[in-house]
């Protein structure tokens, strides 16, 4: 499965999750930069080659949604979404925490910080 296909499937999963939880689409942010997501995925994969690319993209979508959706009128974004959809559950949740609040260092670059700042539009 190529990366574009993975992104399309995960985009649909996030929208469905939002619709299933809220019955309407509030702020399901699916306007992301596919090129940037591919870049992030490649950087993450260089830090841990045992991760599955599908789990990496799942975490990237989840991080993006959790950063962008900051005032949702109803709860729909829960950690069990990651747990339910990941193939390697513990590694995927750890990757989420590493990106959202930790540090993944590749070379001399903190890619966690880079991903968070770029997703929020600070870089």
Image (spheres, rainbow, N blue to C red):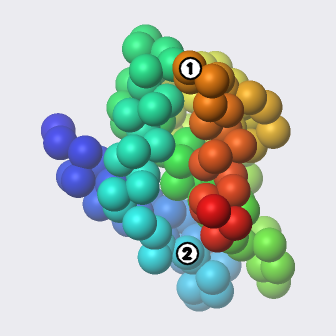
Kindly tell me whether residue 49 is visible in this rendering: yes
Do the residues under discs 2 and 1 have CB atoms within 8 angstroms? no
Of 40 and 55, the residue lying toward us: 40
Residue 96 in sight here: no
Tell me: 43 left or right of 76. Answer: left
Identify the disc placed on residue 107.
1
Which residue is at the front of the view, 83 or 32? 32
- Look at 42% across and 25% down and name the residue there: 45
Q: Which residue is mark 2?
A: 29
First in sequence: mark 2 vs mark 1: 2
Between disc 2 and disc 1, the foreground one is 1
Q: Quadrant of residue 108?
A: top right
> In this rendering, is residue 71 above or below 63?
below
At mark 1, the secondary structure is: loop
Give the CA distance from mark 2 to mark 1.
Answer: 31 Å
Residue 67 lies in what quarter of the image? Answer: bottom right
Q: Position of residue 21 (x, y in %)?
A: 65, 70
Q: Position of residue 68 (x, y in %)?
A: 68, 70
Question: What x and y, as percent, mark residue 14?
Answer: 50, 63
- The kind of secondary structure element at disc 2 is loop
Left/right of residue 46 with respect to residue 104 in the rendered view? left
Q: Residues within 10 Å of mark 2 (few under 14, many from 20)?
A: some
Observer-nearest of 23 and 38: 38
Q: Quadrant of the C terminus?
A: bottom right
Specify the label residue 28 is tagged with: none
């Amino acid at each position: 499965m190529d990366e574009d296909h993975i992104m399309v499937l995960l985009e649909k999963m996030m929208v469905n999750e939002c619709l299933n939880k809220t019955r309407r689409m509030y702020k399901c942010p699916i306007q992301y930069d596919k090129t940037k997501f591919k870049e992030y995925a490649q950087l993450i994969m260089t830090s841990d080659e045992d991760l599955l690319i599908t789990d990496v993209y799942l975490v990237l979508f989840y991080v993006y949604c959790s950063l962008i959706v900051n005032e949702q009128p109803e709860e729909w974004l829960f950690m069990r979404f990651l747990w339910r959809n990941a193939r390697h559950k513990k590694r995927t949740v750890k990757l989420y925490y590493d990106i959202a609040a930790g540090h993944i260092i590749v070379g001399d670059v903190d890619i966690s910080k880079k991903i968070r700042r770029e997703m929020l539009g600070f870089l």
